């Protein structure tokens, strides 16, 4: 396979779908080879309990600076 640049993605919302997407991006070999998790945002950031703190975005208005 050609050497491709990973696509940076952010996950907005951390309900069932958000958790699934984050887990897939971080743990699935195919997904993690193609995608780079830039941030995770949730209205209630304290509910993001299983993601590295450096990936949790506190202010969604600042996503472009990542």
Image (cartoon, rainbow, N blue to C red):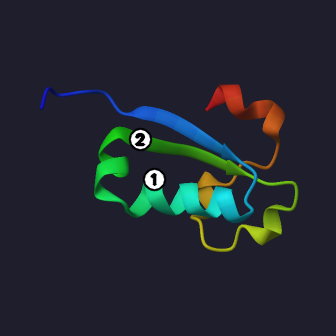
> Earlier along the polypeptide chain: callout 2 or callout 1?
1
Is 39 drawn above or below residue 14 in the view shown?
above
Q: Position of residue 15 (x, y in %)?
A: 75, 62
Is 8 drawn above or below residue 22 in the view shown?
above
Question: Could you say which is closer to the camera, residue 36 or residue 19?
Answer: 19
State which quadrant residue 5 falls in. top left
Q: CA distance from mark 2 to mark 1?
A: 6 Å
Instruction: Give the residue furthest to the bottom.
Output: 49
The residue that appears at 80% across and 38% down in the rendered structure is 60
Query: On the rendered structure, is 18 left or right of 59?
Result: left
Q: Position of residue 13 (x, y in %)?
A: 76, 52
Query: Which label is found at residue 25?
Result: 1
State which quadrant residue 49 falls in. bottom right
The residue that appears at 61% across and 73% down in the rendered structure is 50
State which quadrant residue 28 falls in. bottom left
Is 4 drawn above or below residue 44 in the view shown?
above
- Mark 1 element type: helix
Q: Position of residue 43 (x, y in %)?
A: 87, 54
Query: Which label is found at residue 35?
Result: 2
Query: On the rendered structure, is 48 left or right of 8?
Result: right
Marks 2 and 1 close (CB-CB < 8 Å)? yes
Query: Which label is found at residue 5?
Result: none
Question: Could you say which is closer to the camera, residue 30 or residue 50?
Answer: 30
């Amino acid at each position: 396979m050609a050497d491709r640049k990973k696509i940076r993605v952010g996950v907005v919302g951390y309900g069932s779908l958000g958790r699934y997407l984050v887990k897939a991006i971080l743990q699935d070999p195919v997904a993690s080879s193609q995608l780079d998790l830039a941030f995770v945002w949730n209205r209630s950031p304290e509910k993001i309990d299983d993601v590295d703190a450096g990936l949790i975005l506190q202010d969604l208005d600042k996503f472009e600076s990542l």
